[in-house]
C-alpha cells in the first residue's frame, strides 16, 4: 500500500511548469516572477495558453497518480497517492524540492473524490478571484472549501477527510507569503503576460 504513496509522490514530482518553461525558453521558471513552478506563474510570464497547458498537465498527472494508487492499494492506496502527489508537486525530488503550490493537484483530487467537490472548489475559486482580482486569494479560499465540499458530497470516511485536510494544509502553507501580503494589502492583482522570455 505504501507503494501507492511513492508512486503518487514520484508522479507529483514531475514539475510541468519547469519542463514547459525550459522547452519554451531554455530557462527555469523558478528564477522568474514569483519563483513558483505552477500554472499561475506560467500564465503571468508566458501567457494564458502556457498557464492552461501546465494546469492541464498537472491535473492529469494527479488523476493518473490516484488511479494508479487505487489499482495498487484500493481505497487507501487512492488516498495515499493523492497526498503523495500533492507533496511531490510542492516538493519535487527531481527538481531540488522546489515546486508549485498544489492548487492544480487539489482541483484534480477534488474531481477524483467526487464531482461535487470539484464543482464547489472551482466555483469558490472563480468567485473569490473575480471579486478580489487576486488568484492567490481564490487559491487560498477554495482550498479551505475542500473538506466542507467533501462533506456536502456525502463523504464521511475519516481517512478521506484526513487526506483532504492534509492537502488543504499543504496548500495553505505553500501560500503563507501570499496570505501575509493579502492581509497587508500588498498582494498584486493577476495579469497574464506575453510569451517571455524568448528562447535564444
Image: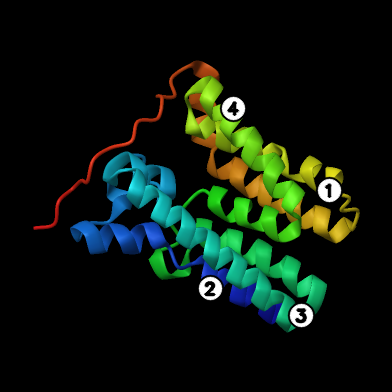
Labels 2, 4: front one: 4
User: Relative to 194, is 176 on the left or the right?
Assistant: right
Query: How far across and down, in percent of the image, does residue 93 sit?
Result: 47, 69
Mark sitting earlier along the chain (1/3) = 3
Q: Which residue is labeled 3 in the image?
A: 73
Query: How far across and down, in percent of the image, does residue 127 sit?
Result: 60, 28
- Residue drawn at the location 67% of the way across and 81% of the way down: 3
Furthest residue toward left: 200
**Mark 2 nearby-residue class (10 Å; few <14, some 14–19, many ≥20):** many
Give the secondary structure at mark 4.
helix
Q: Find residue 83 and report its image quarter.
A: bottom right
Give the secondary structure at mark 1.
loop
Q: Find residue 122 and report its image quarter.
A: top right
Query: How far across and down, in percent of the image, does residue 141 sit?
Result: 64, 33
Kindly identify which numbered label has been placed on residue 128: 4
Q: Which residue is labeled 1 in the image?
A: 153
Amino acid at each position: 500500500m505504501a507503494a501507492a504513496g511513492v508512486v503518487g509522490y514520484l508522479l507529483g514530482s514531475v514539475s510541468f511548469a519547469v519542463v514547459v518553461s525550459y522547452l519554451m525558453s531554455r530557462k527555469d521558471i523558478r528564477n522568474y516572477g514569483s519563483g513558483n513552478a505552477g500554472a499561475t506563474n506560467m500564465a503571468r510570464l508566458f501567457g494564458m495558453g502556457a498557464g492552461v497547458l501546465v494546469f492541464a498537465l498537472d491535473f492529469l498527472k494527479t488523476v493518473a497518480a490516484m488511479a494508479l494508487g487505487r489499482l495498487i492499494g484500493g481505497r487507501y492506496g487512492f488516498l495515499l497517492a493523492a497526498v503523495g502527489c500533492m507533496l511531490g508537486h510542492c516538493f519535487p525530488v527531481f527538481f531540488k524540492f522546489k515546486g508549485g503550490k498544489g492548487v492544480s493537484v487539489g482541483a484534480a483530487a477534488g474531481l477524483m473524490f467526487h464531482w461535487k467537490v470539484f464543482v464547489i472548489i472551482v466555483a469558490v475559486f472563480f468567485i473569490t478571484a473575480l471579486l478580489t482580482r487576486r488568484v492567490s486569494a481564490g487559491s487560498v479560499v477554495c482550498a479551505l472549501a475542500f473538506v466542507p465540499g467533501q462533506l456536502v458530497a456525502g463523504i464521511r470516511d475519516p481517512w478521506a477527510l484526513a487526506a483532504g485536510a492534509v492537502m488543504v494544509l499543504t496548500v495553505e502553507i505553500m501560500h503563507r507569503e501570499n496570505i501575509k501580503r493579502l492581509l497587508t494589502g500588498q498582494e498584486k492583482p493577476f495579469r497574464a503576460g506575453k510569451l517571455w522570455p524568448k528562447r535564444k
